Image (cartoon, coloured by chain):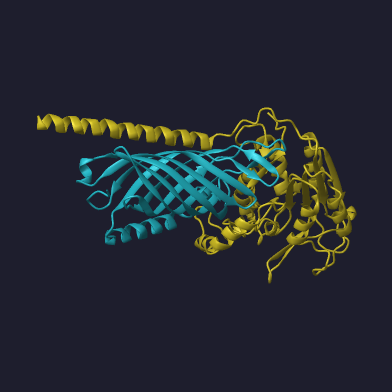
Chain colours: A cyan, B yellow
Amino acid sequence: MANNRRHIFVPVFFFITAAFMAALPVAASPWRADLSGGALYAPSYGSDVALLPAYGFGIGGGVELVTNYWIPIRGELDVYSIGASAWDPTLFRYRAFWGYRLAAMTGLRVPVGSGELDFLAGGALSASRFTGLSVVTAYASLVGEVRFLYPVSFSFLKGREANIFATVPIEYMFRGNARTIAAGLEIGLGFQLSKGAAK
Amino acid sequence: MKGEANIRQTSYIAYRDAGASIALILVLSLGTILAGCSIPSSGLTTPTNRYALLIGVQDYQTVTPDLKYPDDDATGMKAMLEAQGWTSVTTLINSEATYASIKTHIEALSTDPSATILVYYSGHGSIDEATGTAYILPYDVTWPVDAKWITPATLTNWLAAVPAKHRMLILDSCYSGGFTLGDGSVDTAQADYSQYNYQTWDKTLLLGALSKFGAMVADNLSTYGDHEVLALSASGSEEVSWEDGAVQQGVFTNYLLEAAESGDVDGDGYVTVNEAYAYTKQQIRKNWNIDYAYSFYPDEWDFLPHISGGTGDLVLYDNPGP
């Protein structure tokens, strides 16, 4: 059973993260990075199974390019875990699962007071494992985020702009015989990778 | 004044930072707790449309050697499922379990599209090493392989054709892990545990799973609405399963029956197929692979159950003991 605790995608996680971070210093445009985490409500349904509630959480990080009113590209890597669903009256439920998700999004950036409101949408690929089992799977999903950022400053960032933010993420997962809709509330911290603000 | 302003600003940022950190911790904690909780099962009643077909073949028409305990496996499962609230449990023992009879009885298992059906088999299994195709053997097969050897594709098609909402398949036979593959997923457990180091994962299996990433995504995009079969097997697709004279049953079936009393891991009053898998795997590893078989032929008799992919789990026993 010890084998079940081994996260087989950890090397992939680190490889992708390292590759992404290594590419960042060459970017000439203003980039931001962030870390966030939060709770998820993630019900699933099937062609003959009604919506069955489940709950979970996710933590992750993102890197994005910022222009005046656009976020042309945002990359996001998350680790998430969704618990087993509620029971169907036929004594059926959806299995618990956890995994890694790599998402690419684009969207609008709307100034609101001294903060900003972002509307992002895109797609994602996930490598997932059924919790407690040795069975792994991979699936695609549509993702979206509504996010409010508020600027802060931290002395250790040496003049780089920073922000705290709250996000409402929404994801629609194509999981074989199931469709899962995940929505939740995440809170995070972000900072600019290069000095100078995006106006 | 400037110093005071800096101190105030620093304090303000510190408070705000602390507030954000506390909020993050609270949200994460809530999510972690929620993900770990079982959603209560109160208010559920035992369905009246769960139908099982149990097959046990030990005395074959021509194939040798015969087995000793598949009839005990099937009758033991029948008593247990009836005690656990299954609506109807039919057995096919030895000469009753011909190819034609198995097919006919599966087709007749249910006429109710909202039913749950279970097919259980204990008997000989085999594998075509060239193609990797697994088989279970009805009473009237001949050796070597003939048209009556039942493949995963054949059995899955039979089960899919039955009007039902949920389908379960449990196999106590050699190489039965060949019946748990597919469903847009990859099993990263060894197909042959006699070569398995319990403390490490296998690089080949990891790379194998990653190399099928695109295929899994494509499967998961295209299989919505298919009839999923939740399959549990006694052994991997490259290993044999064993009988045990001490308990006069298949090793796997013995612990599968025991799971009714001891397998309710989350304490919700139900033993699901996932939980039965976890329990049988734990017990076979501890009591058979490590304690018993190792004393005769280290590693060579090792085997462990496997389970299929797919998104769902089903209750096997819904009246667990104390």
Q: Residue at x 82, y 37 (%)?
A: B87
Between B290 and B77, the one lying in front of the other is B77
B250 shown above or below B27: below
Q: Residue at x 82, y 47 (%)?
A: B53
Image x and y of residue A96, in percent = 57, 43
Relative side of B255 to A122, left or right: right
Given the current orientation, which residue lies at the most extreme left position? B1
Residue farthest toward the bottom in the current orientation of the protein? B130
The number of discs equals: 0
Residue B165, position as x, y percentages in the image: 75, 45
Q: Quadrant of the N terminus of chain B?
A: top left
Q: Is residue B3 above or below residue B94?
A: above
Asked if B43 appears above or below B262 in the picture, the reply is above
- Using the rendered image of the protein, determine whether residue B298 is visible from the camera's viewpoint: no
Where residue B36 sits in the image (x, y, percent)? 53, 36
Residue A13 figure quarter: bottom left
Q: Is residue A95 left or right of residue B110?
A: left
Q: Is residue B135 left or right of residue A6?
A: right
* Left or right position of B66 against A137: right
Residue situated in front as seen by the camera: A38 or A172: A172
The quadrant of the picture occupied by the C terminus of chain B is: top right
The answer, for residue A80, to whether it is visible in the render is yes
Q: Position of residue B63 (x, y in %)?
A: 84, 63
